[in-house]
Amino acid sequence: MDYEFKIHTIGNNKGQPLISDLEQRLQWIKQRGYEINISQFINEDQRTCIIDLRLRGNINNLVFRDEDIIYIFKHQLSESLAEHIMNNWENELLWKEIQRNCRRYSNEEKDIIFEKSVSFMSRCHDNESLNLLMNYGRKNRITRRIFDYMGENRQIVVEGFINFCLREYLNELKFSVEVACEELKNQKEYNDFINLLRYFVDSQVPRMQEVNLMIGEKGTFYLWDGEGTKIDEHFMNYYLEDMLVEEINLDDVLVSILITISPCHIILHNTMHMEPSEPVQTIRKVFKERISECCGCERCKNINVKPSTF
């Protein structure tokens, strides 16, 4: 038996991780007495790496035929190449997609899009188990395409194979860049919104010296001044009609009330040990140096305190 296969991939020492992985994966075949030679050639321009693999053996094995060993060899090689593409080509492919379709963005913004795209491809969902499943499925699809390709070919040019045989994978990369661009756009709009709110707060005279804020369950909240007097009912009545007609939620109302009051000092209660909610994050960004955290007053300790009813 004499089976040979050649791999053409990018140079600059990126072929070495592939060779190391192949040597480890093919140990099982070597332990059965078969000879596997792996040679590497790098072009003078250092851009292309050619890996030559040769499987030899003349063993009378009662369990595995030569065809079985070749099948296992090809499958191991397919898996290794799939990981090679995902680990060593993916970032370059993402960057090419960004350079091609994000020309209106600055270099700094392109770097942000790249980081977001890489993050999206590596963890498509907050659920870790689902992430592993999606990455496993992506790798399996690439492995199957490579294995099928090896059925009729004795060499593979990785870049060409990606461009012409992995359109689904390239579409996933393109989608990740589109998602990253949309996230960047939303982040810029949010930052502009925060800056506008900050400008509005800084440009008006504070109507109160101190406001205390406690967030309750299901988005409820209540406010009191430095003397302990509740101050929310009056402002809630002001926004009540908008809440009924335009379906404004309590989060928007809370931010609007604080911006209207524009206090010199805001004390956040019962938020240090809570998951940061969107309104609290917005309040912190808008009021910044005016914010302080309560370390545990009687109101925070009293779990029976109920938020105001609006």
Image: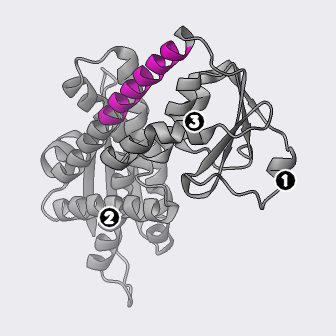
Tags 3 and 1 in contact by the CB under 8 Å rule? Answer: no
- Which labelled disc corresponds to residue 44? none
Please state if 270 lies on the left or on the right of 151 as rendered: right
* Residue at the disc numbered 3: 281
Check disc 3 and give the amino acid type.
Answer: Gln
- Which secondary structure type mostly characterizes the magenta part of the structure? helix
* Residue at the disc numbered 2: 140
* Residue at the disc numbered 1: 301
Which of pointers 1 and 2 lies earlier in the amino acid sequence? 2
Residue 24 lies in the magenta stretch: no
Spatial CA span between label 2 and label 3? 41 Å
Please state if 50 lies on the left or on the right of 164 as rendered: right
Dot 3: few (<14), some (14–19), or many (≥20) neighbours within 10 Å? few
Spatial CA span between label 3 and label 1? 23 Å
How far across and down, in percent of the image, does residue 234 sit? 56, 37
Tags 2 and 3 in contact by the CB under 8 Å rule? Answer: no
**In front: 107, or 268?**
268
Q: Which residues are magenta?
A: 181-201
Q: Residue at x 41, y 24 (%)?
A: 193
Element under label 2? helix
Direction bottom: furthest residue: 62
